[in-house]
Image (cartoon, rainbow, N blue to C red):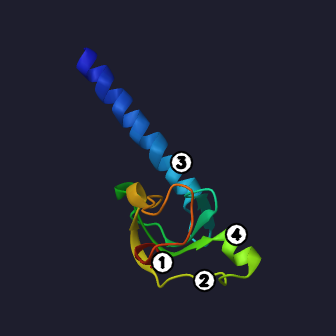
Amino acid sequence: MPERRLDLRTRLARKLRELYWRRKYRPGRTVTGWLARDIRRDVEVVDSTEIDKGIILGKIRTWNVLYAIKGVKAEPPFSDVKRLELEHLWDWSGEPWGGPVPESEKD
């Protein structure tokens, strides 16, 4: 009996997560997140048909907001459409305090 409850809880948690993802990552929406104090990532969702698997199609822009405001660097355009895993969407490989956006993050 306890195994059945665990299975039910797991399925319920999975369904709630999928519902949350469906609402947050709707096609046409731009989702924004802060990766460090001055580093912002914008994700423009193009397609979310594989959201059940944790995958969307979208465009990404990772940029340093302070650099853009001060005129050091311009706000970059969005990247080309690519397949994005939600699990790794908000990972940051740069410094925890921000700073310049690493080349690996610019795509």
Marks 2 & 3, CB-CB < 8 Å contact: no
Q: Residue at x 75, y 76 (%)?
A: 70
Q: Residue at x 67, y 84 (%)?
A: 74
* Disc on the earlier residue, 3 or 4: 3
C-alpha distance separating marks 3 and 1: 27 Å
C-alpha distance separating marks 4 and 1: 16 Å
Against 104, residue 76 (above or below) is below
Q: Amino acid at mark 2?
A: Pro
Q: Which mark is residue 72?
A: none
Residue 105: quadrant of the picture: bottom left
Q: Position of residue 26 (x, y in %)?
A: 57, 64
Q: Residue at x 57, y 66 (%)?
A: 99
Task: Identify residue for label 4.
Answer: 66
* Disc on the earlier residue, 3 or 1: 3
Which label lies toward us, 4 or 1? 4
Task: Identify residue for label 2.
Answer: 76
- Disc 1 crowd rating (10 Å Cα; few below 14, some 14-19, many 20+) is some
Task: Identify residue for label 1.
Answer: 106
Q: Amino acid at mark 1?
A: Lys
Judge from the rendering whether residue 43 lies leftward or rightward of residue 84; answer left or right: right
Marks 4 & 1, CB-CB < 8 Å contact: no
Marks 1 & 2, CB-CB < 8 Å contact: yes
* Disc on the earlier residue, 2 or 4: 4
Picture quarter with the N terminus: top left
Q: Position of residue 69 (x, y in %)?
A: 75, 75
Q: Position of residue 98 (x, y in %)?
A: 57, 62
Judge from the rendering whether residue 34 lies leftward or rightward of residue 46; answer left or right: right
Q: Amino acid at mark 3?
A: Tyr
* Disc on the earlier residue, 2 or 3: 3
